[in-house]
């Protein structure tokens, strides 16, 4: 039985453990090639890095909030459809997975730029006189990121909603509960595990985004992954880039551990 796990362990080691280990070792290499903590000291003391981490977590939180507000009604609508219609609708949800993030991001740039399809249409209809600032800023970044990560939220939430017994809502209705009250008192608590799991997945994915903020942010939205790229490409500082990567991994691990601890404390609602 143990032999069956060997290929998976080898793949995990080569694809995750070894690269992360090498990155961790490299993060302790200073500018002069000696072993030191100067890369981590720079991250701790420099207000620039503090701002970058703040922007990264803010953008991830905003994206997650928008995804929850938009994705929950969508997942609920899908869960109430009959089987065939639900499968067709779910096909639309899964379609973004068949296109690379880079292609989707540039498609949004074509739509959102000052002379893009959206602004040109609105100006042609007389709805606006000047182009709306939809790209090269936080707005464009959020729109692009929400589109990319939406399926990662809808899929676990949809599965959680489909697992809710419809008879529970009927029972609540027979006991005199209005549909709205039955939804909030019965359906929503039972779908909460899927909501929390999906939101956590989206938040963690957003912490490592590079392409979308780089293209749609126009240099105004600098996230950690973009700074890592700059440290390597512009400053040729692999140690500083590795330290940023390790810091982000540690913060993400702490976040996941905290979420797991809170779920255990609340009876395992996150699964």
Image: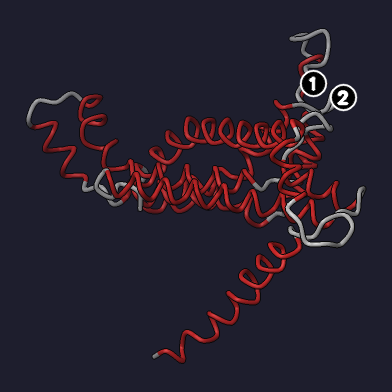
Q: Nearer the viewer, residue 55 or 94?
A: 55
Instruction: Name the residue located 69 percent from the left edge and 34 percent from the top edge.
Output: 50
Residue highlighted by disc 1: 119
Which quadrant: the N terminus?
A: bottom left
Of the numbered discs in the image, which one, if any, rests on residue 219? none
Helix, strand or loop status at disc 1? helix
| Whole-number angstrom distance, CA of label 2 to CA of label 1 | 6 Å
Residues at discs 2 and 1 in contact (Cβ within 8 Å)? yes
Is residue 117 in sight in this rendering? no
| 205 horizontally vs 73: left or right | right
| 258 horizontally vs 247: left or right | left
Q: Nearer the viewer, residue 109 or 17?
A: 17
Is residue 192 in sight in this rendering? yes
Question: Alpha-carbon neighbours of circle 1 within 10 Å: few (<14), some, or many (≥20)?
Answer: many
Q: Nearer the viewer, residue 229 or 243?
A: 243
264 lies above or below 192 = below
Of the numbered discs in the image, which one, if any, rests on residue 115? 2
Helix, strand or loop status at disc 2? loop
Instruction: Name the residue located 19 percent from the left edge and 37 percent from the top edge.
Output: 169
């Amino acid at each position: 039985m143990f032999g069956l796990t060997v290929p998976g362990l080898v793949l995990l080691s080569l694809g995750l453990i070894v690269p992360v280990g090498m990155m961790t070792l490299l993060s302790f290499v200073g500018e002069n090639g000696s072993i030191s903590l100067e890369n981590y000291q720079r991250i701790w003391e420099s207000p620039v890095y503090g701002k970058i981490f703040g922007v990264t977590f803010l953008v991830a939180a905003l994206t997650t909030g928008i995804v929850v507000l938009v994705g929950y009604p969508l997942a609920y609508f899908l869960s109430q459809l009959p089987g065939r219609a639900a499968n067709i609708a779910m096909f639309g949800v899964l379609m973004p997975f068949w296109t690379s993030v880079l292609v989707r991001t540039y498609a949004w740039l074509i739509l959102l730029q000052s002379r893009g399809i959206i602004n040109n249409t609105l100006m042609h209809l007389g709805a606006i006189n000047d182009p709306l600032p939809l790209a090269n800023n936080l707005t464009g970044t959020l729109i692009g990121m929400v589109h990319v990560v939406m399926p990662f939220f809808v899929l676990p939430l949809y599965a959680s909603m489909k697992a809710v017994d419809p008879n529970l809502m009927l029972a609540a209705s027979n006991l005199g509960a209005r549909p709205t009250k039955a939804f909030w008192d019965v359906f929503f608590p039972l779908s909460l595990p899927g909501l929390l799991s999906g939101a956590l997945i989206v938040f963690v994915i957003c912490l490592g985004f590079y392409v979308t903020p780089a293209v749609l942010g126009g240099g105004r939205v600098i996230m950690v992954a973009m700074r890592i790229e700059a440290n390597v490409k512009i400053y040729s500082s692999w140690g500083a880039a590795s330290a940023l990567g390790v810091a982000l991994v540690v913060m993400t691990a702490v976040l996941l551990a905290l979420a797991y601890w809170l779920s255990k404390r609340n009876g395992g609602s996150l699964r």
